[in-house]
Image (cartoon, rainbow, N blue to C red):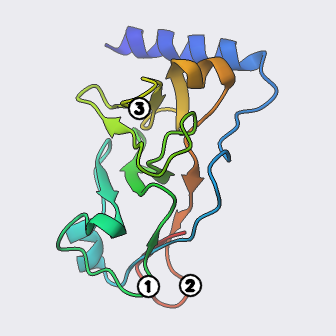
Amino acid sequence: MILRRIFLIFTLLTAMAGCDTLDNRRLPLANVHLTFYTQADWVTYGVSGARQYRIFIREKRQPANYPYTADSYTGFGGILLCTTDIGDYVAYDLACPVECRADTRVAVGSDGIAECPKCHSRYDIFSLPGHPVSGEAADRGYGLQTYRVSPGSGGEYMVVY
């Protein structure tokens, strides 16, 4: 497993060395703002251990018990909130950057890779920050759109924006 991951990372880095940039800003602009006001909110709705993830789609009220407010926005296709292999918090838009449709969302498989159900592009969300690993996205250099996750400046525990 470790050798496979090292080989995958080496292959991706080698392939990306020939590319100018990773295009992870292909989706239409959309508001993003999720607030976790307390540590208890983060424990209940956030992510804490390595390789954990949570999906937020306001229009679908997902997760059903998350306290969405008028100031809550979940991007173009929804938010995929994750903890990387090394414990960093990251957030991605769920919309596939190849398809550029709000209703064509990536899904995380048991192997920890997010895959588009339409074009079947696959993205590494835990080791490489939303980088494509196969499919049309890898051919074109399209990565998942990223959002920031950080402690709030107004006393909030964590904010996704």
Q: Farthest residue to the bottom: give it.
A: 154
Q: Which residue is mark 3?
A: 116
Q: Is residue 65 left or right of residue 37?
A: left
What count of labels does the image hold?
3
Q: Earlier in the sequence, mark 2 or mark 3?
A: 3
Mark 1 and mark 2: Cα distance apart in space: 7 Å
Name the amino acid, label 2: Ser
Q: Residue at x 29, y 71 (%)?
A: 42
In terms of secondary structure, where does tag 1 sit? loop
Q: Residue at x 20, y 70 (%)?
A: 44
Work out whether 61 lies above or below 121. below
Work out whether 33 lies above or below 21. below
Q: Which residue is mark 1?
A: 156
Q: Which residue is mark 2?
A: 153
Q: Is residue 120 left or right of residue 154?
A: left
Q: Quadrant of residue 34?
A: bottom left
Q: Residues within 10 Å of mark 2 (few under 14, many from 20)?
A: few
> Where residue 1 appears, x then y in whole percent?
31, 13
